[in-house]
Amino acid sequence: MLQILSGFGFLTGATYPLRVLAVLRRAPRLWSYLAIPILVNVVVGIALYAGLLLPSLRATEELEISLSNRLDSLLVNLPAWLGFLRFLSSGVDFLLDFLLIVLLFLFTGFLLVQFGTLLGAPWYGQLSEKMEELRTGKVEIVEVGIFRDIGRAILFELKKLGLGMAIGIPLLVLNLLPGLGTLMATIGGVTLTATIICLDFLDGPSERRRLSFRKKLSIVLTSLPASAGFSLVCMGLITIPLLNLITIPLCVAGGTLFWCDRVYPKLPKAGSQGKLNKTSGVPNP
């Protein structure tokens, strides 16, 4: 019954960013690991909002005016009995304005996640480690060396880019079909964005165990629908301007909690060769 009420885990997954607040209340020392990531996000956010968001808002406004003028020119010569179409055009204008602004904020928030987590990776890594240690009593790390570690980080970003292109380009083509094609492309675009965001926020504990990209993607898919609830809430949180400077670190911590609760128990027993317990510095039993 609880499974049904929680949407088979969807609603439970959606609560993880908020669960972090309860953990921080019980362990206030963790706030110190949020300070620098928030500062990094402020710097990156200022750059993105000043260099991208404000010019894009002006361009969006010009596009809206142009589309509105074209629509008005089509409606001006309509007979009186079709006058109701003018009211419909006002509704279309409002809906278009809303969708364009939401998509713009979502895109800006998505970029903030990508650049913010990349630049703040060392501090996000520490935050994730502390959350895992608090949740499971230990932190498991497979040591591979700094150069291989950097190579894995670069490869992870390239594979995310490849995934985005492999799915995003067909979606753009599908978007050329009016009506159903646009709807399917929109749903596909949201799903793709949510998947990449989920990969980012679950990456801390996954990368410490040096899982492959395919395994990381498999974790996202096999954790459905809980991972969908988690990623969609995170999408909403990173879309809100200024607030996302704070919510991104919360989503990183929430991703670690999600991983510890819903992924870790399903993994093979700890203690595989090369895996270390960081808290004790000895191989796991």
Image: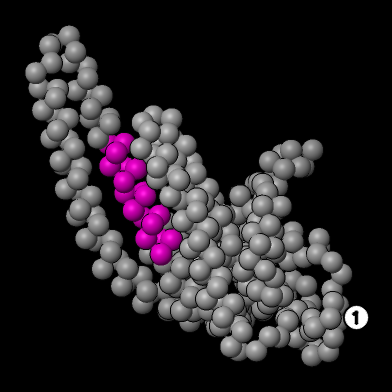
- What's the residue at 13%, 35% (across, down)? 69
Residue type at the position of mark 1: Pro
Give x and y (percent) for residue 164: 48, 57
Of residues 90 and 178, the one drawn nearer to the viewer in this rendering: 178
Q: Is residue 162 visible?
A: yes
108 lies left or right of 214: left
Q: Secondary structure at mark 1?
A: loop
Magenta stretch, overall SS? helix
Q: Is residue 158 above or below residue 72?
A: below
Crowd tier of the residue under label 1, counting other residues whose Cα lies within 10 Å: few below 14, some 14–19, many 20 or above = few
- What's the residue at 72%, 75% (across, down)? 209
Give x and y (percent) for residue 254: 62, 64
Q: Is residue 4 above or below residue 284?
A: above
Q: Is residue 258 above or below residue 65?
A: below
Q: Is residue 96 magenta?
A: yes
- What's the residue at 39%, 39% (across, down)? 175
180 lies left or right of 141: left
Residue identifier under label 1? 285
- What's the residue at 41%, 67% (across, down)? 112
Of residues 164 and 244, the one drawn nearer to the viewer in this rendering: 164
Q: Which residues are magenta?
A: 94-111
Give x and y (percent) for residue 224: 68, 49
Q: Which quadrant, please, contains the C terminus? A: bottom right
Give x and y (percent) for residue 30: 61, 78
Q: Is residue 135 magenta?
A: no
Q: Which quadrant, please, contains the N terminus? A: top right
Q: Is residue 197 above or below residue 276?
A: above
